[in-house]
Amino acid sequence: MTTSPLFDIAGRIALVTGSSRGIGRALAQGLLEAGCTVVLNGRDETALARTRDELAGKSPAFASAVFAYPFDVTDSAAVAAHVAAIEDEVGPIDILVNNTGAQHRAPLLDFTDDDWHRLIGTNLTSAFLVGREVARRMVPRGHGKIVNILSVQSETVRPGIAPYSATKGGLKLLTKGMCADLGPSGIQVNGLGPGYFETELTAALVVDEEFSAWVRGRTPAGRWGRVSDLIGALIFLASPASDFVNGQVLYVDGGMLSVL
């Protein structure tokens, strides 16, 4: 149900990359609950199928509205083939959520070439490849919503994550560049920037009391984010309510970036 047609996205088809767990899974579930047909993506076919079955089991309406397409979003040929298959088998993609991401923490002087290239490929190249391929199909239709998942590290950084921040900062400017190129075709490209969120990937940080105390103290809201905190922002960016919002980043960080 929606209280305003401005936020009505029922019947839209959404592709969410990196959606077998964590933030991507939560965003996929939020889109399902808003009435979308959702295509899940990830490289681990078993994990993706498990997530698909779990989401399908939450509601009879979800059973026929959630699909799983495992492919490597850093492989240009795989992206092209699978986007074509999704559009042929599920339908035209109205909403793309580029969520695929990875983290690797190490001092800058110890960071290996392989780890650098892996982060660049996973966090930045993937959004370019999938965004380009989906946009090629959105442009002739004259509409579409692309939401890139950024981070507060698109704006700031802590020791040990310089390459990660470089990828997220790059994704912020890619978002603005995509807006510049695709806006004239009726496509909105925006970023969603989570703060510190409690997920499977941050579990070790959450239980580190010193780090958790820093997060709570640094965040005006006084807590870690919950994945459910992101869903409303995504629905706004995916809905007609944001038709004149383009090239922007909506930070959902409990106020972290607003204070020193």
Image (cartoon, rainbow, N blue to C red):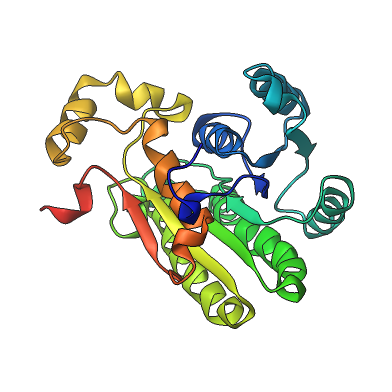
The image quarter in which residue 232 lies: top left
Question: Who's the residue at 59% across and 37% down the image?
Answer: 28
Q: Is residue 6 above or below residue 215?
A: below
Q: Is residue 22 above or below residue 125?
A: above
Residue 245, by quadrant, is: bottom left
**Residue shown at 77%/67% (left/top)?**
137
Q: Which residue corresponds to the image point at 36% horizontal and 36% vertical from the top-left? A: 229
Residue 56 falls left or right of residue 1: right
Q: Point out residue 101 in the picture as x, y percentages from the top left corner.
A: 54, 45
> Residue 70, percent across and down?
78, 38
Asked if residue 188 lies left or right of residue 196, the reply is right
Determine if residue 248 is in view.
yes
**Residue visible at 76% across and 34% down in the picture:** 68
The image quadrant that residue 145 belongs to is: bottom right
177 lies left or right of 211: right
Q: Tally the marks.
A: 0
Q: Could you say which is closer to the camera, residue 85 or residue 150?
A: 85
Whether residue 47 is visible, yes or no, is no
Residue 97 percent across, percent down from the top left: 58, 51
> Is 231 displayed left or right of 102 in the figure?
left
Where in the figure is residue 207, as x and y percent of width and height? 30, 18
